[in-house]
Amino acid sequence: MALSDRRDLLILGGGLVGMTLALAAAKEGFSSHVVDRADPAELTAEGFDGRASAISTASWNLFRNIGLAEGLDKHACPIATIAVTDQLKPGRIDFSPEPHEGTLGRMFANRQLRLALFEAARGEPLIAWHSQAEIVARERGEHAVSATLADGQELAGALMIAAEGRGSPTREEAGLAIAKWDYRHRAIITGLEHEKPHENVAWEIFYPAGPFALLPMLDGADGTHRSALVWTVDEADAAGTLKLSDRAFLAEVDKRMGDLFGAVTAVGPRASFPLGFHHTARITGDRLALVGDSAHGIHPIAGQGLNLGLRDVGALVEVLADGARLGLEPGDAQLLARYEKWRGLDAFMVALATDGLTRLFGIPGPAASAVRRFGMGGVQRMPLLKRWFMDEARGVSGDVPEMLRA
């Protein structure tokens, strides 16, 4: 069996979080193997399908610090305001930063993020990228870690990092305990084309069945106004909603968005995924660190899932770089303990807050709606509370890793 060159990091999962980690680590001089089962060509295929991510201010700083911002900037749709409303009734909250503070974040089609990351990874000698690769065995020893691929190649490193997403086989194999529950809801994702411009407003409209989020996207090349839709439906209704004809689906969407963007003229392909919450009690093991959805999966209600993973990236790279200056190698137990302490609590608090919001807005009935709108009216009148929410959304509160600062 051929043992390939040993690198500092063995990153299992080359999605948005795993590839950002490899690039951020390379900036600090760490080499890595990135192993992913997906085909990059499929992930970057043309077309507007509504799969998009909100990139917070802090995450944008990370992209800038690893050299991605310049190429990505032209694909960004700024979020100027976040409007939160209960069923489009009076009493909404508008989050709008001061002019000197810039935007609340930027919306990107996931395809554009992947293109930028993949292009940068291909040009980075410190990254060995193994795509369309199946892992058949993982080993974590006292002095090294390794993964054996289906083709017999064995990749070695000092630290194994699980970036495989929610169903992480590496986490399961390591026996890291996980708390999880299913919301029995499904998110339906698609792209919409509509008559009026969105004016860079992200809408979070709460219905008893779940949130209905409209996220601003860049206009099409022909000037068409576009938004991404993330619509949460009850698991029991999901299959029926996905099967609706485009015309029937549009009628349902129209009902829920009122006249916000005028007539919806087209709808893209629909995708869906089940919604659940999970949080690992520990995000490290012997020579193992978890990042992103492998460690914590949250409801998309606040659009913070990817940003949470990018905070993990910034913290882990900073911890490893600080350790290297002291002569410690990446798998060192005290470095992993520092990463655990730094990210464990912050990620848990964000997860708890999004879970609380999901439950609060899911209480049916006119009385619950009236109470929510009363509370939202209170937040609208309290600048300090609004400021706190905006800082959270922009990712600039708390102990922010160096790479995520301006």
Image (cartoon, rainbow, N blue to C red):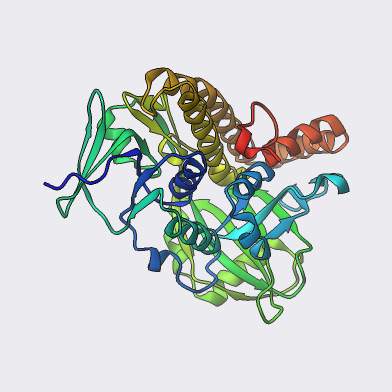
**Relative depth, front residue between 30 and 348:** 30
Residue 291 as seen in the image, left or right of residue 251: left
At horizontal 78% and vertical 40% (from top left) the residue drawn is: 373
Q: Position of residue 103 (x, y in %)?
A: 76, 50
**Relative depth, front residue between 76 and 147:** 147
* Position of 22 relative to 42 (above/below): above
Residue 160 as seen in the image, left or right of residue 26: left
Q: Position of residue 280 (x, y in %)?
A: 41, 28
- The answer to whether any part of residue 383 appears in the image is yes
Can you tell which quarter of the image residue 337 is in? top left
* Position of 197 relative to 122 (above/below): below
**Relative depth, front residue between 370 and 337:** 337
Quarter of the rendering occupied by the C terminus = top right
* Position of 40 relative to 207 (above/below): below
At horizontal 24% and vertical 23% (from top left) the residue drawn is: 142
Residue 117 as seen in the image, left or right of residue 204: left
Q: Position of residue 348 (x, y in %)?
A: 53, 27
Can you tell which quarter of the image residue 279 is in? top left
- The answer to whether any part of residue 207 appears in the image is no
Q: Identify the residue at the far bottom of this view.
A: 222
Q: Position of residue 192 (x, y in %)?
A: 62, 69
At horizontal 14% and vertical 51% (from top left) the residue drawn is: 152
**Relative depth, front residue between 126 and 84:** 126
Residue 281 as seen in the image, left or right of residue 97: left
Q: How many marks?
A: 0
* Position of 350 relative to 47 (above/below): above
